[in-house]
Amino acid sequence: MRNHCLMHVPFEGPAAIADWCAQRGHELTRTPVYSGGVLPAQDDFDRLFVMGGPMGIYDEAEHPWLIREKAFIAETIAAGKTVIGVCLGAQLIADVLGARVHRNPHIEIGWFPIDLSEAGRDSEVAGFLPPSVEVFHWHGDTFDLPPGAVHLASSEACRNQAYLYEGRVLGLQFHIESTPQSVTDITTHCADELTPGAYIQSAERILAATDEDYARINGVLFGILDRLP
């Protein structure tokens, strides 16, 4: 399988998604859209990953590449491909599908559980998971559920944590691709966001995650990716 990844900042890459691709024998290519990277032709890839970033989907004046990226995501969905969005990526996909993206009532940063919805528990993509699982979060925005999408999961701080559209377009507000290095990177580059809040953990708490924590979330990632078309 030929996988392609869209990156919005250097420090939010595919992380454990690259490990999944390597272990499954799949190709993985990348476009740094933030630096004017060339987007691939639709014939050049099979599955698209849209990663996170500290900007918002509405910051087109500051980041004009968002305009062409949104058009590319829409083209990819229309082509019938599998598309997975993480955090900002999930918000971009939701926007393309006609949903509102806006500030969440709470900023959610750190290790917090998500709870599967009934539809999530019954789904092929997420039904193998326990009803509640702790994952890594770093977001201030959220999305409304896109028209026609299935709501998969929520958290105490954020109602819409995951959705599935047409069985092949997946939006994840949380980060199950995280590795010790990627969490260290985002904690370093976005340290100014670690202000006191009900759902904001300290850098020390975030970085105290164990190998078992990363094995758990990466196991969730691998299980989901194995079940998508």
Image (spheres, rainbow, N blue to C red):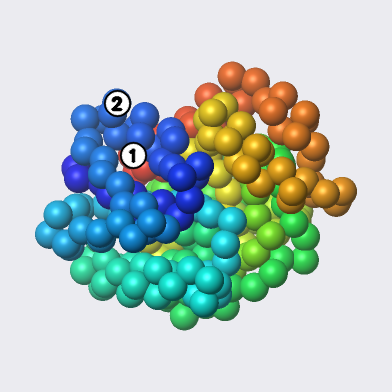
Q: Quadrant of residue 76?
A: bottom left
Q: Is residue 43 left or right of residue 95?
A: left
* Quarter of the rendering occupied by the N terminus: top left
Disc 2 marks a residue whose amino acid type is Gln
Secondary structure type for disc 2: helix
For image coordinates 71% across by 33% down, the residue present is 206
In front of the other: 51 or 36:
36
Q: Earlier in the sequence, mark 1 or mark 2?
A: 2
Q: Separation of disc 1 and disc 2 at Cα? A: 11 Å
Mark 1 is surrounded, within 10 Å at the Cα level, by few (under 14), some (14 to 19) or many (20 or more) other residues, namely few
Q: Quadrant of residue 8?
A: bottom left
For image coordinates 58% across by 49% down, the residue present is 174
Residue 51, horizontal then vertical, whole percent: 45, 52
Residue 136, horizontal then vertical, whole percent: 63, 40
Q: Is residue 191 left or right of residue 197?
A: left
Mark 2 is surrounded, within 10 Å at the Cα level, by few (under 14), some (14 to 19) or many (20 or more) other residues, namely few
Labels 1, 2: front one: 2
Secondary structure type for disc 1: helix
Disc 1 marks a residue whose amino acid type is Asp
As drawn, the label of residue 226 is 1
Q: Is residue 83 left or right of residue 217?
A: left
Residue 71, horizontal then vertical, whole percent: 33, 74
Residue 44, horizontal then vertical, whole percent: 14, 54
In front of the other: 26 or 226:
26
Residue receiving disc 2: 23
